[in-house]
Structure formats: structure tokens, C-alpha cells
Amino acid sequence: MSLNAKFEALSFDEAEAALRAPEDAARPRTLVVFAGNELAMSERVKALLKEAQAQIERAAGATKFKGKAGSALEILAPVGVAASRLLVIGVGAGNSDDSDKPAKFEDYLSLGGQTAGKLAVGAAAVVLFDLPEAPSEPAAAAAQFALGGWLRAYKFDQYKTKKKDEDKDGPIEIQLGVADAESAKAHVLEATHTAEAVVLARTLVNEPANVLSPTEFARRASELMKLGVEVEILDEKAMAELGMRALLGVGQGSENESRLVVLRWNGGAAGAAPVAFVGKGVVFDTGGISIKPAASMEDMKGDMAGAAAVTGALYAIAARKAKANVVGVLGLVENMPDGKAQRPGDIVKSMSGQTIEVINTDAEGRLVLADALTYVIEKHKPAAVVDLATLTGAILVALGQEYAGLFSNNDDLSERLTKAGTATGEKLWRFPMGPYYDKLIDSKFADMKNTGGRHGGSITAAQFLHRFVGKTPWAHLDIAGTGMGSPSSDVNQSWGSGFGVRLLDRLVKDHYEG
Ligand code: BES
Ligand code: MN
Ligand code: ZN
């Protein structure tokens, strides 16, 4: 997982010294500074740009740049600075709804993304992270800034054989001048792991299904062993012995065998109950015999975004050696139509012993999750379990692509997740659950059926999962709208977003450590 940007945390003095060194003609330098409303700048930045002041004011006047958040001013050949380009990034009020509030943690993430977006591939830059209003935790804010830059710079282009010239220039190199360089170095290092974790998840989502079969996914997940993660892979025989007929039924029409991957990070007290994450890993979802229409079916290579998020989260947690016990389970299958495929009307017995009438073979994710949830709860007795799944198209109808749906049997867990979502910008919106919705999945022939009709489709899917978790505190995140095909943002230009990685890592950091 190589990152397309390099950040080096320096003191302000070191960053200014770097600026006094002559510029490399082959790698022209950009100086990045920040301005608030009406071009407000820190004293240090003002002093540094004294000779360019008239130039800046003239350019600002000509482009009506006032320092608003989200805007930027570009000046070529600024007078008196050894940089070919000066970028003044606006951080002032006047752009967002809560613009009168001080900048929040996630604002520095977007700021890093915006800045990286303005730097060409292969560029060299000196950033003076000396804002007109200093952040309360400058080192942590600087690391968020770097993280935003890494996330922005990610590109999935390994299948493009004709690269543009600028794409051969290597990563952006950024020297980041900060108030407390020592502390920032440590924070930036930790942010590197987070960036690698998100990038890992994005790449898994972006990979086509002819490359990323369940076994190949399992192989990639098992590389987490290098970080000290225990990896166990259950093949079809092992799953059959456990009675996982719900999961196996989904994969039975595919030439590619199904796998269940168990990832364990034991960083907490020995014997303490872990927190469990379960991911839907349908490497391709044709719908099976209830086949999907052709339009956009290619997007269903991303139907493993939940499993990708869980893999990324375990990467982040292990890389920073979190003092927590975490177990991740990936239910990896391919849903294909075939002579051996399961049919509508089939009745399967799940590992829990409950029977399921398969009304629609395209409602396959819940079948996979049912057995994965039973497995992790029986085997690992987790204190809490969170599953992530691109489960329903209906969640896109309800929430669009801004929030993921949250469904839970536990108010505390819901609140923890919601807060982690706000903090990371991976936002969640809780839906109602209850007996009314549960009744909709009662079956004429079995204990339940796998669809609940047109109404409340995301909720009936969650009710189905709820029947497999017993009293364990559980939450289900429907990421069908946020895990893939996301609109481009400051921190993501990739089809696979990696949604959930930072959220789960944050949840662990805030509630399951130490
Ligand atoms: N993987 C799909 C859900 C999905 C749809 C994810 C669009 C991302 C974008 C899931 O397996 C599915 O097909 N769900 C059905 C359920 C229905 C048959 C009850 C759906 O949402 O239509
Ligand atoms: Mn489906
Ligand atoms: Zn699916």
C-alpha cells in the first residue's frame, strides 16, 4: 500500500530554512499558507511574505479572494520567496452553515485534502501549518491535515497502461512546518497507518471480481499477519461442518469457493471480551437466479465494501498497536446464477439452527451475515458486534450517499457509533426497528424469509440480522450508499471510498481501549 504523498513534519524554523534553500528546477516548489477572513494571516506568515504583500493583495483583488473556507489564491513567482508558486488556502468563515463555530477536527482533514488537490502529482511543497486561528491541538490537527492529503492523493490506476506524464513523477513531497514538530511527527506516523488502512480498503473495493475472488480476498486479508493479526481461514468444508448453510447457499452457484476469514487482534487484557466487526464480502453480486438487470451491474464488484472496511479497520488497529481485543469476520462469497445455484423457494438451515426460506436470491447479503454473526457470537462471545454491509438499494433511496444507515438493539452502542461518525465525517443515521417490521419477514414455510416486501426494505433487512444476534449489543451499518460510487470530495476521488475504516478505528480508540 504505497501512499501517493509524503509528509515530513518540521518545526516552523526548519520549514522556513527549507524555503531558503534554492529551488530544484526539476521539482518546482510550492509554498502553502493559510488566510482567514479578509486575508488574515499569522504574524509569521505575514513576515515571511512581506515582499510579496503587494502582489498578494493585487491578485486577491483581481480574483475576489477573501480567505473564505474552500477558496484558494494562486500566485506564480511570488517576490522574495524561493518558491515558484504560492498557494494561499482560505480557512475563513462564510462558507458553511456553522461557519461561526471554530474549526473542528474533521475540518483539518478536508483542508489537507483541498491542499493536496491543488498540488500537482510529483510536486514539492512547503506547508506552513500556521493558521490565523491556531487549532487547540496543533500536532493532532497537523496529522489530520496530512491524512486528508493522503486520502486525496489516492488513485486506483494500476490497470491503466498508458499513464500521463505527470503520473510518472512519483508522490507529492510535503514538508509540513508545525508548532510542535516532535509531537506532530508521532501523530503523523499514526496517521500514516490510518491512511494505509483506508487505501487498503479502497483498493479492495475497486478491484474487479475476476481478480478479487473470495480466496484472493482471503489471501490479501491474511497479509495482516505481518502486523501481528492472527488469521484463520475457514474453507467450505469447515463451514459445512459448522452448519453454515445460509452462507454456503449463496456461494453454491459460483465456480469460486466461499471463505470465512477471522482476523484477531489481541492488544487488550488477556481474556477480555473482544469487540467484533463483521463484513459482508460478496465479491460479486449478480443477484443469482433472481438476476439483476444489466444496467450498472458492474458496480456489484463493490458488494464486498463491508468486508473491505473490516479488513482496513483491523489494519489500522493492529498498525497502531491498539490496547484492545478486536475480532473481524469476513463472509466472502460470489453470488452467481448456475445449474447449481440456489433457487427462490429453497429453504436453508442456518448455523443458528433457524431455517430461512429464500424468496429472492438477490437478498443474499443477509444470508451471509446471518452465519457470520452466529459464528462470531458463539465462538468469540464479543462485548459488542458491529456489522457493515452494502445490504440494500433502499438505503440509497432513504439517505442518498451522505449518511450510512444505523440499526441497533442498543442505545449506548448506537450513540458511540454516531459520535465516532461525526468525528470522522463517516456519518450515520439511526433507523427504527421493532415487532411491526419483524413480522414482515415471517415465512409460510420456514422460520423466516429473506425479504420483507417493498416497504421499509432496509429495516426488514436489519430485522433479519437481528434474529441472529440474541442479546449481544449489536449494530448494523448499511453502507450501500457510502461504500462505493461516492461523489468526489476533498478527501476522496476514488470509487471505493473506504467508508467505515476510520469510523471503526475511532470507535475502538474512544471506547474499547485501555
Ligand atoms: N448488494 C445489493 C444491495 C446494493 C444495491 C448495494 C445497490 C449497492 C448498491 C443487495 O444484495 C441486494 O441486491 N439487495 C436487494 C434486496 C431485495 C432483493 C430485497 C435490493 O436492495 O434490491
Ligand atoms: Mn443482492
Ligand atoms: Zn448484495
Image (cartoon, rainbow, N blue to C red):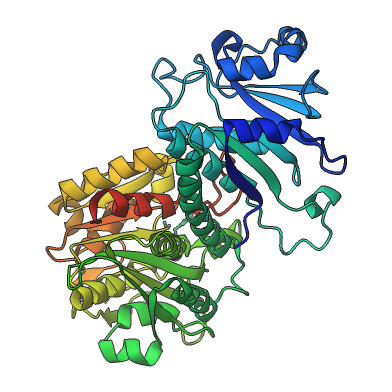
Comparing 78 with 474, the one in front is 78
Residue 402: x and y, percent?
44, 39
Ligand 2 shows up in which quadrant of the image?
bottom left
How many numbered marks have been drawn onto this rendered protein structure? 0
Q: Is residue 149 left or right of residue 475?
A: right
Residue 15: x and y, percent?
64, 34
Q: Residue at x 70, y 17 (%)?
A: 49
- Look at the image and tell me in which quarter the C terminus lies: bottom left
Comparing 368 with 307, the one in front is 307
Residue 418: x and y, percent?
29, 42
Residue 299 visible at all:
yes
Q: Quadrant of residue 13?
A: top right
Q: 431 above or below 227? A: above
Q: Residue at x 45, y 70 (%)?
A: 227
Q: Quadrant of residue 163?
A: bottom right
Q: Residue at x 26, y 44 (%)?
A: 431
Q: Residue at x 75, y 14 (%)?
A: 52
Residue 134: x and y, percent?
46, 23
Q: Is residue 90 left or right of residue 408?
A: right
Q: Is residue 201 left or right of residue 48?
A: left
Q: 63 above or below 246? A: above
Comparing 489 with 274, the one in front is 274
Comparing 429 with 36, the one in front is 36
Residue 482 visible at all:
no
- Look at the image and tell me in which quarter the N terminus lies: bottom right
